[in-house]
Each structure stands twice: as C-alpha cells, then as structure tokens.
Image: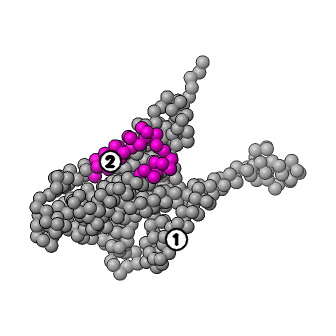
Amino acid sequence: MSGVVLPSKAPLLSGKGWTAFFVALIAVCALAPVLNLLVPAGSALHMSDYAVALVGKIMCYAICALAMDLIWGYTGILSLGHGLFFALGGYMMGMYLMRQIGRDGNYKSDLPDFMVFLDWKTLPWHWTFSDSFIATLILIVAVPGLVAFVFGFFAFRSRIKGVYFSIITQAMTFAAMLLFFRNETGFGGNNGFTDFKRILGTPIATQEMRMTLFALTGLTLLGFFLLSRWLIASKFGRVLQAIRDAESRVMFSGYNPLPYKLTIWVISAVMCGVAGALYVPQVGIINPGEMSAANSIEIAIWAAVGGRATLIGPIVGAFIVNGAKSWLTVAYPEYWLYFLGALFIAVTLFLPNGIVGLVKKWAGREKRVPAEEPKQRAVAVEQGAEPASLPVQAEGARA
C-alpha cells in the first residue's frame, strides 16, 4: 500500500510578496530618511517632518489593525476593547518618558509636574521601575499581555462569544478609561502624560530622533507582519481558522479551543501594546481618551475596510482611513464622522471582503479569461471556423 503524500508546506511569502516586502523595507529604512534628512526642504522630493509624524502614527495604527485581523479575521472573535491594550503600552512608555524629564519640568522637581501639583511627596509603587528603559520594554509587553490573559482566560473558559464578548470588551475598556481619569491613580488624570523631553538621554524633538522612531515603527510593522504570516500558515493558524468556521466541530475533533483562543488573544494584545509604546513618543501625549470606545471601534473599521483574513488588508485599511481622516478633519471637520459611518456601512453591504478582497476578485477574473480561451477556440472549430483563424500554437498542436 502506497503511503499518503502530504502537500509541501507553503512558503512564508511568494516571490512577489518578498519583492514587495523588501521594497517596503527599503522605503522605511533608506528612502524616507534620505528624503527627510538629506533632501533640502525646498525640494519637491523632500519629506516634511509633518509627513514623517503622520506616516509614523498611521504605521502604529496599522499594527493595531493587523492585531485585530488575527483575532477577528482568522479566529472570528470581534474585540471592541483593543484600544485598552494600545493605551496600556502607551502609558508604560509615557511613564518612562515622564521620568526622563527629570528637573526640567515647570516645578524643577524629581517628581512629574502633575504629582507636584497634587502635592504628592513620593512616587506611587507602580512607578518603581519607570526610570529603567529595560524594565519599561518588559512592562510594555507584560502589562497588556497579563491583562489580556486574565480577561481572556475567564471569558473563553466561560465560552462567551459573539456579540456578548464584544460588549464585555467594550465595557472593560470603558471601565479602565474611567479609572485612568482619576487623579489618585497616578496616571495624570484627564491630562495624561505630555511635554516629553528625552528618550535614552537623547532629545526627543530632534529630526534625527523622529526619523529613528519612524524607522523603528516601520521595522516593527514589517516584523509583526512576518510573524502573523508564520502563525497563520502553521498548524496553529489552521486550527484558529477552524475555530472561526465551526468551533463545535473542532471540539468534536479532540481540540480544546481555549489555549488556541487565549494564545492568539494575548499575542494580539501585546502587538497593540507595542504599537501604543511606539505611538506615544511620536505624538507626544497619552491620555485616557485613547481608551475610548470609539478608538476601539475604529480599529475594527480599519480591518473591515482593508479586508479581514488577509493580513495586508488591515494595513491598507489603516492607511486609507487615517489618510482620509487627516485630510477631512482639516478640510471638512464637521463631516468626518459621517464619512466614517458611511464608509463602514458601504463596506459591510457591498464589500464584505474589503478592498483587498475586491482587488483579488478582479485579479481572479482576469486569470480566468485566458483559461476559457482554448474552450472557446474548440467550440469555434466545431462550428466550422477556418484553421487559418486559429493561433499558430493551436496549428502546431494539431500537426
């Protein structure tokens, strides 16, 4: 009896995919720095500091959209609370940046200005490691990951799913926002953290530092994209998609969905936390408003507009929606929310697979047309078409 031949493992990216990846890598690490730092400001090719900050911010959003695609597009779990994980990572970085101000604040104190204003004498316990960059990097990953693990364990163990899970995640984010608004929690109240001076002892407002943060954000986005591709192409990713399509059948097949759902939930939360940490030094502020329900809903919109379960789609969606937002909020600020709502409704009704899904559909049609031509030629021969009207390749084949 001959053995069963298993299909070979698909490559991480196709040839065109790797080409596009390296083009993006060159654009982030070489082209953008040259256009911003070396090309004169008066040149048409110059990349302004505003463009650097805007694209850097959108790349942070794209990481969040990619994280949403892993949990929603490939696992079928719609989260309306990912803004919480984004803000937690941002607050961890913000605490470090506040400590880096030192005595350069308005009150010339070792304590952050808002603590001096509130007549605090010492740092609260959760600021203990905020002066260490290494500890901050660990907390950026650990805090969102731990919160996601605790919440996800109890939610998934209780088999909460669907709209109920979405509502609970939104409620969790709203509760956290109310907590961070309180001055006594030690997170700056409604003002949050701002007026950052340095990072690793280097002034944060310099053109070189901004470009460094830009390149680091781009590399992080590309790295998370490859990680996501690897996860989805593995057996782990196939189980996630099976859970999305028919969780009960997965259970009947002997798989416990809990560890799979919990693992991808934590990974998705950590990705958002890292995005928040990269966002704060580029934007220069973090406050509880980042935990608002609207921000979490926007993350889902980016994924839906670009195309769920495609990985590249949410990144495209984040750039399109936020690019339009940056223009509309200046040109027509009173219509921005109407545009966002109309866009989401249009995508839901007419583009269920998003923009990338539409492009793939068009590309698929173009590929099917040449495949139908031989059949059409055969029909023409049967109907009495002249041999001379057939292509040379067909004549050779007949000979």
Residue closest to the far right: 384
Residue at point 35% right, 64% down? 289
On-image quarter of the N terminus: top right
SS at badge 2:
helix
| Mark 2 → mark 1, Cα distance in angstroms | 34 Å
Q: Measuring 39% from the left and 43% from the top, which residue is drawn there? A: 152
| Local secondary structure at mark 1 | helix
Question: What amino acid type is highlighted by mark number 2?
Answer: Val
Percent across and percent down for residue 356 are 55, 57
Residue at the spot 52% in from the left edge and 60% down from the top edge: 305
Towards the viewer: 117 or 91: 117
Read off the magenta span. 140-169
Q: Was residue 168 drawn as part of the magenta stretch in this picture? A: yes
In depth, the one of 260 and 14 nearer the eye is 260
Q: Is residue 325 or residue 221 the one in the foreground? A: 325
Of all residues, the one furthest to the bottom in this rendering is 42
The residue carrying mark 1 is: 338
Where the C terminus falls, by quadrant?
A: top right
* Mark 2 surroundings within 10 Å by alpha-carbon count, few (fewer than 14), some (14 through 19), many (20 or more): some
